[in-house]
Image: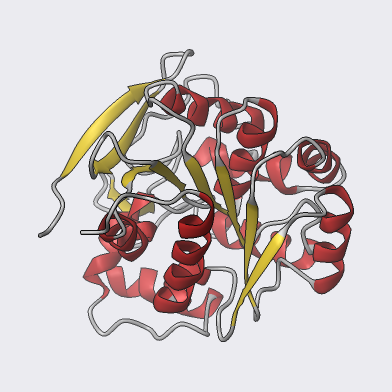
């Protein structure tokens, strides 16, 4: 039976409203999905379906400044603020959830799990405290590249294909509209607050980002899984080894033929890795 999914709004303590897709039994263990910078909750489509089928309640949220969530009126997109937004959602639940976060969402989830006591398990998707600076710069450059937007969906598809050639260019680019807004001038713009892009280096640039996350990692007391795309230009063997110094119990799931966008590159392998980890550490009732 297909789970019913409702759109829900959560209001953070600074008044910013967060939009989320919520499905599953409210009495079941919960999983909160947090996407990466520049993405929306739609990037978790197949992962959410798998977790619902596994018997979890799933909350799939647009980060502030992204998708259908509010933009911060003071452009507050600090990683600590994103972690506090997760805590806003956690407070509505009867018990701590598993936090699953990709890239930016993973960094926020790490802080929420370590410093806010907001998790019973933690999954980090292709993010570690010490990012490969070349990979991080490539992401920021892509996000800043078209402040004037695009005239057509074909232009958008061309830009994505040039940035991420590992992924097959879609024959029908209409699905990209989930990540776009059409402004009054008719041009298409990415579905995020331009102020977030202006401040992107604040949350991704060493050394502040690195030391901040290592401090958090040393305080993590819940089972933690790192899912790495083996073709990622963000996470390296050395960065994982360094991460383990601060978090010795870290588990790693390597996904072959996947880059930084692991869940989208290899849906089945990603979902199997996350599902297996959660079954061991946060078992759900009988799956559907």
Q: Which quadrant of the rendered structure holds the C terminus?
A: bottom left
- Residue 32 position, x and y percent, is 43, 42
Q: Which quadrant of the rendered structure holds the N terminus?
A: bottom left
Residue 185 in view: yes
Q: Residue at x 62, y 35 (%)?
A: 113
Judged from this view, the residue extending furthest toward the left is: 1
- Residue 69 position, x and y percent, is 36, 34
**For residue 41, above or below residue 77:** below
- Residue 170 position, x and y percent, is 31, 81
- Residue 230 position, x and y percent, is 65, 80
Q: Residue at x 52, y 70 (%)?
A: 262
**For residue 264, above or below residue 25:** below
Q: How is the image coloured?
A: secondary structure
Q: Is residue 126 left or right of residue 43?
A: right
Q: Residue at x 22, y 69 (%)?
A: 174
Return the residue nearer the eye: 262 or 209: 262
Return the residue nearer the eye: 239 or 38: 239
Q: Quadrant of residue 213?
A: top right
Judged from this view, the residue extending furthest toward the front is: 286
Return the residue nearer the eye: 288 or 58: 288
Q: Quadrant of residue 272?
A: bottom left
Residue 159 in view: no
Q: Is residue 163 left or right of residue 224?
A: left
**For residue 9, above or below residue 152:** above
Q: Is residue 110 left or right of residue 67?
A: right
């Amino acid at each position: 039976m297909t789970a019913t999914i409702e759109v829900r709004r959560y209001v953070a303590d600074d008044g910013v409203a967060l939009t989320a897709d919520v499905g599953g039994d409210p009495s079941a263990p919960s999983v909160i999905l947090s996407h990466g910078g520049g993405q929306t909750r739609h990037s978790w489509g197949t992962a959410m379906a798998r977790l619902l089928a596994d018997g979890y309640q799933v909350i799939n949220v647009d980060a502030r400044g992204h998708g259908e969530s509010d933009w911060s009126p003071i452009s507050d997109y600090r990683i600590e603020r994103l972690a506090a937004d997760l805590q806003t959602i956690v407070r509505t639940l009867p018990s701590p959830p598993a936090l699953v976060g990709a890239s930016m969402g993973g960094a926020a989830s790490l802080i929420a799990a370590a410093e806010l006591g907001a998790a019973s398990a933690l999954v980090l998707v292709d993010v570690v405290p010490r990012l490969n600076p070349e990979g991080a710069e490539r992401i920021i450059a892509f996000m800043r590249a078209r402040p004037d937007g695009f005239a057509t969906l074909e232009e958008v598809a061309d830009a994505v294909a040039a940035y991420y050639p590992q992924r097959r260019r879609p024959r029908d680019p209409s699905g990209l509209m989930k990540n776009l807004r059409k402004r009054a001038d008719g041009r298409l713009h990415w579905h995020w607050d331009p102020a977030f892009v202006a401040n992107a280096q604040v949350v991704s640039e060493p050394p502040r980002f690195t030391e901040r996350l290592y401090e958090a990692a040393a305080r993590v007391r819940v089972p933690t899984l790192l899912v790495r795309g083996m073709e990622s230009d963000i996470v390296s063997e050395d960065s994982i080894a360094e991460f383990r110094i601060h978090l010795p119990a870290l588990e790693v799931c390597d996904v072959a033929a996947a880059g930084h966008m692991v869940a989208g590159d290899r849906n089945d392998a990603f979902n199997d890795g996350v599902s297996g980890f959660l079954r061991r550490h946060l078992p759900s009732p009988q799956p559907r």
